[in-house]
Amino acid sequence: MTTAYSELYGFVRTAIGDPGGDVPDYSSGSIDAAISLWLLREDDYSKTTVGEANYITPDLTDKDDTFRISINAAIFLATPNAHSFSHKSPVLSVQRGSRFALVERLKTLLRDSEGIALDSDDSITALLEGFSRYDDSTSSGVVV
């Protein structure tokens, strides 16, 4: 059995605050690359490609592993943009604020989640949605 990378897209996008939709901040290909990069460090899981689709082998049945792989993929995606960025051309102007705080909060969430029992996809989503509502100015920790 295998788990399609696409099953992790929602978790990764929620962790990095990407609404997805018609114009996501991160393409499926970018998320695939981040998951593949993390799997290079894994002893228990590997990448399998069938046609153009990527899969994790063996099947991700442990929700803690699903969470860990998703968060690490989100960290890989957000880290290159840790500092602010802007670009202007006669046709286009792009500006993105610093994501350094996001990267640090993801690392903290990953570290602090050790020992939390994640028994379903809903529990992972709830944890990540709580995290995405985290506000530095009003809270001293991750909202779960």
Image: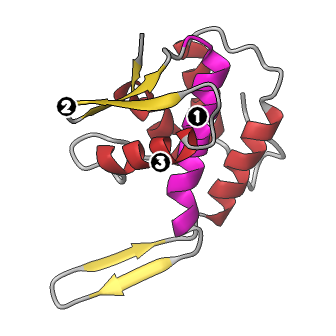
Tag 1: amino acid: Ile
Front-lying residue, 21 or 81: 81
Q: Which residue is mark 3?
A: 34
Q: What is the spatial separation of the Cα atoms under label 1 and label 2, in whole angstroms?
A: 23 Å
Q: Where does the image place residue 5, in percent across and percent down from the top left?
A: 39, 30
Tag 3: amino acid: Ala
Q: Where does the image place residue 117, in percent across and percent down from the top left?
A: 75, 13
Question: Given this view, does label 2 or label 3 mark the residue nearer the observer?
Answer: 2
Residue 79 falls in image quadrant: bottom right
Q: Which residue is mark 1?
A: 69
> Hey, which residue is sitting farthest left in the picture?
91
What residue is rendered at 46% in x and 43% in y? 36
Mark 2 crowd level (few <14, some 14–19, many ≥20, 10 Å Cα): few
Q: Mark 1 or 2 closer to N-term?
A: 2
* Any part of residue 6 in sight: yes
Tag 2: amino acid: Gly
Front-lying residue, 114 or 60: 60
15 relative to 36 in the view: left or right:
right
Q: Is residue 92 above or below residue 20?
A: below
Q: Are marks 1 and 2 in contact (CB under 8 Å)?
A: no
Residue 7 inside the magenta-drawn segment: no
Question: Which numbered tag is attached to residue 51?
Answer: 2
What residue is rendered at 84% in x and 46% in y? 140
- Which range of residues does the magenta coloring cover? 61-81
Of helix, strand and loop, which one carries label 2? loop
What residue is rendered at 41% in x and 48% in y? 33
Residue 15 falls in image quadrant: top right
Q: Mark 3 or 1 closer to N-term?
A: 3
109 relative to 48 in the view: left or right:
right
